[in-house]
Image (cartoon, grey):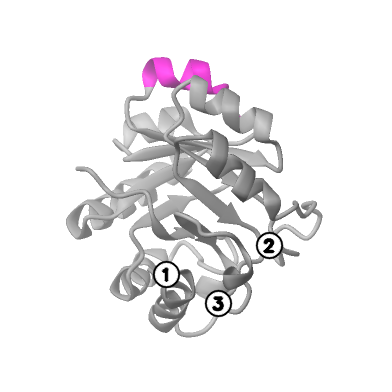
Amino acid sequence: MGVALRGVYAISDEVLSPYDKLPNLLEHAIQGGVRLFQLRDKTRSDGDLLPLAKDLAKICAKEGVGFIINDRLELALECQAYGLHLGREDTPLKEARKHFKGVIGVSCYGDLDRAKEAQSLGADYVAFGACFASPTKPKAPTIAKEVFTQARACLNLPLCAIGGLTPSNISTLPPLDMCAVISSLWLGDITQNVKALKKAMGA
């Protein structure tokens, strides 16, 4: 399944998208036009997450949505995820690529050199942020918006923005391939939230 790496990129949150409701919430997000969805959990074990991950993977496969696992290489392999997303403290990209043949995205914060290295090691997309103050990660430092323009000039990868994105501030960023969202997606009317974010992106 080839899913285009563009548009609204939904990320789960243990509080805002509780797991007993997440499959239903995801369906609403997909109705709005989400094409990529990431399961992100920093506390539970792979074993605890596996049944949920398999359920979410089925929903995504049925709807033509790319299902991405944050950080957990073994879990991504076990549930045959479409993608894997890696941060600074996660499995090194070079190591992950030996085992995982799907899409791999890399968090680059505001670091263009990290993004260049990720591209050279086979990343499929890079994410920069936090773009704005984020209610989900209040301690995350914000980055200079120019990094997107600089990245576009020297990279040949889809660019993803993350951190405090809303329909009203997306337009202040340079053109993007993907916008990764948590708070502005799961609070309120999810389907309408996605539509508003897509409109702000010009998607």
- Nearest the viewer among 152 and 20 is 152
- Indicate yes or no whether the magenta region holds residue 182: no
User: Which residue is the site of mark 1?
Assistant: 21
Give the residue type at disc 2.
Answer: Thr
Sequence order check, earlier mark of 1 and 3: 1
Q: CA distance from mark 1 to mark 3?
A: 25 Å
**Residue lying at 30% horizontally and 50% vertically, measured from the top left:** 4
Disc 2 on helix, strand or loop?
A: loop
Instruction: Judge the density around disc 1: few (<14), some (14-19), many (≥20) Cα neighbours within 10 Å.
Output: few
Sequence order check, earlier mark of 1 and 2: 1
**Dividing the image into 4 quarters, which one contains the C terminus?**
bottom left
Instruction: Judge the density around disc 2: few (<14), some (14-19), many (≥20) Cα neighbours within 10 Å.
Output: some
Tag count in the figure? Answer: 3
Disc 1 on helix, strand or loop?
A: loop
Task: Please state the horizontal and vertical placement of residue 135, each as a whole percent of the image.
Answer: 71, 67
Give the residue type at disc 3.
Answer: Pro
Left or right: residue 69 versus residue 60 is right
User: Which residue is the site of mark 3?
Assistant: 167
- Nearest the viewer among 18 and 92 is 92
Mark 2 vs mark 3, foreground winner is: 3
Mark 1 vs mark 2, foreground winner is: 2
Disc 3 on helix, strand or loop?
A: loop
Q: CA distance from mark 1 to mark 2?
A: 19 Å
Does residue 11 appear anywhere in the picture? no
Question: In the current view of this chain or complex, which residue is farthest to the front?
Answer: 153
Q: What is the span of residues highlighted in magenta in the rendered image?
A: 89-99
- Indicate yes or no whether the magenta region holds residue 96: yes
Task: Please state the horizontal and vertical placement of residue 185, each as a whole percent of the image.
Answer: 51, 72
User: Which residue is the site of mark 2?
Assistant: 136
Mark 1 vs mark 3, foreground winner is: 3
Sequence order check, earlier mark of 2 and 3: 2
